[in-house]
Amino acid sequence: MTPSEARVISSPYRLSTGPDRQGRQGSASVGTALKRLAPVMADQRRSMIAAFVATIVASVAALVAPIIIGRTVDLYISNRDFTGVLRSAAMLLLAYLAGLVATYVQTQQMGSVGRRVLFNLRNALFTKLQWTAMVMPCAILVLSLSLYFMKKS
């Protein structure tokens, strides 16, 4: 997707709650902020799921490695079974490789999600600024003309 092909997101969202009744500026909770960012992140569902699955796989691989090492020490090294040690080393290598690949996938997916969400936010902001730049002069003109004709009558 190139920036020129990206669709414009014009859904309203704010990360602050705005001033309350007493005029104090409120701050949004994390849940509120995520709800407001949901329209911007709507097309990122697959990447988010892939990153989540990759995070789970990396965590499981990191938790399995000490179990493999402990099992190797208890069963194979104490009994001097070096073929078992080699099998355990191969399993440990596979666990570390799975963790490496999963961490890479997670990093790539979350990086691309971040880039796309920022692009969508910038695009929405630019569209809002363009709309404001078009509407404000027209509103000022209408207001000026109405004040002019009100003075005449």
Image (cartoon, rainbow, N blue to C red):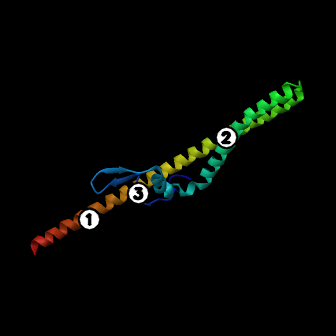
| Residue 40 appears left or right of 131 | right
| Residue 72 appears left or right of 152 | right
Gap between marks 1 and 2 measured at Cα:
57 Å
Given the image, on which type of amino acid does mark 1 rest?
Answer: Ala
Q: Which residue is mark 3?
A: 127
Q: Sequence order check: which comes first, mark 1 or mark 2?
A: 2
* SS under mark 1: helix
Q: Position of residue 29 (x, y in %)?
A: 44, 50
Q: Which residue is mark 2?
A: 59
Residue at x 18%, y 65% (from the top left corner) = 144
Residue 68 occupies which quadrant of the picture? top right
Bin the neighbour count of mark 1 within 10 Å (Cα to Cα): few under 14, some 14-19, many 20 and up.
Answer: few
Direction left: furthest residue: 152
Given the image, on which type of amino acid does mark 2 rest?
Answer: Ser
Q: Which residue is mark 1?
A: 139
* SS under mark 3: helix
Q: Nearer the viewer, residue 84 or 75?
A: 75
Quick check: marks 3 and 1 in contact, CB under 8 Å?
no
Gap between marks 3 and 2 measured at Cα:
41 Å
Q: Position of residue 37 (x, y in %)?
A: 48, 54
